[in-house]
Image (cartoon, rainbow, N blue to C red):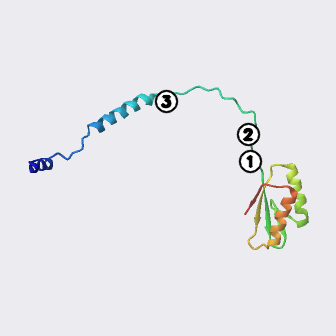
Amino acid sequence: MAFASAASHRNAIADINVTPLVDVMLVLLIIFMVTAPLLDQRLPLALPQSTERARTEPRIVELAAEPGDVFALDGRTLAPGALQAELVRLREAEPGLALRVAIAPDADYQTAATALAAADRAGISNLKLE
């Protein structure tokens, strides 16, 4: 008898029962069909309008520092002593001024320090180093 039951298990069908899988898929299909129209509905909202002006990008002034304490502000060559005064004048004219400092690769550290110190003493806090 024991041998007969082992033999019957060898002949058993080894397929997966797909009926529960089909049931789950049909339930998911029905759920998606019911909820799909709900996704397209929109709720009308009356949003308040902003009273603040749109922010504008700050004007970017380029300061080039060349070897030998040679400075150029937007293409105009300046002496090291006049650099800070010119930066103060520009900052007072435009408080949101942005300064892009381009230091030449062959410039010494003193030239770079002079340019950055002049910007700091002028009160310019928006800097970009290149």
Q: Is residue 130 left or right of residue 75?
A: left
Q: Secondary structure at mark 3?
A: loop
| Residue count near mark 2 (Cα–Cα under 10 Å), binned few <14, some 14–19, many ≥20 | few
Does 35 appear above or below 21? Answer: above
Q: Amino acid at mark 1?
A: Glu
Q: Which mark is residue 54?
A: 2
Q: Position of residue 114 (x, y in %)?
A: 84, 67
The correct choice, above or below, for 83 with respect to 29 in the image is below
Q: Earlier in the sequence, mark 2 or mark 3?
A: 3
Report which quarter residue 100 is drawn in. bottom right
Quadrant in which residue 37 is drawn: top left
Camera-nearest residue between 105 and 124: 124
Q: Residue at x 83, y 71 (%)?
A: 110
Q: Quadrant of residue 23?
A: top left
The answer to whether mark 1 and mark 2 are in CB contact below 8 A is no
- Residue at (73%, 39%) from the top-left corner? 54
Q: Secondary structure at mark 2?
A: loop
| Secondary element type, mark 1 | loop
Work out whether residue 50 or residue 12 is closer to the camera in this orientation and state it. Answer: 12
Mark 2 or 3, which is nearer the eye? 3
Asked whether the viewer can see residue 79, the reply is no
What kind of residue is marked 3?
Answer: Asp
Q: Position of residue 96 (x, y in %)?
A: 80, 49
At which x and y percent is residue 19? 26, 37
Residue where numbered disc 3 is placed: 40
> Where does label 1 land, which residue?
57
> Is residue 62 something one can see in this rendering?
yes
